[in-house]
Amino acid sequence: MPPGGSATKKSSLRPKRVDINRDFDSLERLTEYVSNVSKSGAFIRTRDPWPVGTKLNLKFTLVVEDPEILEGVGEVVRVSDKPRGMGVRFVELSEKSKTLIEQLLEKQRARR
């Protein structure tokens, strides 16, 4: 602390993050799901999309050979009414999640 003064604290606020991880017992309870995935992001269908700019903690299952969990941080970049949902850009992904997306995209290309 400076002599005769007070220390000035700089705030290091982080953007609010919202968890996206819906576990469900049956399809009747399913309210959010990923309908499209690319290297750069995903489209999440939901009745109640978050506003553009919202940071999301992502955790959802992708099926390549076996179901595997993709984890990371995304940011809402657009909201859509038809279909109802939000476009999310990947901000941070684990190396495992990046590899999983690449495997999924390669499998889709092979089907064409």
Image: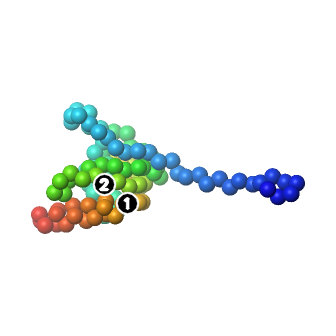
- Name the spot of residue 79 as percent of width and height, x first: 38, 49
Tell me the residue at 71%/53% (across/down): 9
Q: CA distance from mark 2 to mark 1?
A: 8 Å
Residue 82 appears in the figure: no
Residue 112 relative to residue 77: left or right: left
Q: Identify the residue at the far left of this view.
A: 111
Residue in front for this viewpoint, 3 or 93: 3
Mark on residue 93? 1
Which element carries disc 2, helix, strand or loop?
strand
Q: Residues within 10 Å of mark 2 (few under 14, many from 20)?
A: many
Asked where in the image residue 107 lies, by quadrant, the reply is: bottom left
Going by the numbered disc 2, the residue's amino acid type is Leu
Residue in front for this viewpoint, 83 or 90: 90
Tell me the residue at 42%/60% (across/down): 91
Q: Identify the residue at the far right of this view.
A: 4
Tell me the residue at 41%/49% (across/down): 57
Residue in front for this viewpoint, 87 or 20: 20
Residue 4 relative to residue 104: left or right: right
Q: Does the residue at mark 2 contact the one at mark 1 (Cβ under 8 Å)? A: yes
How is the structure coloured here? rainbow
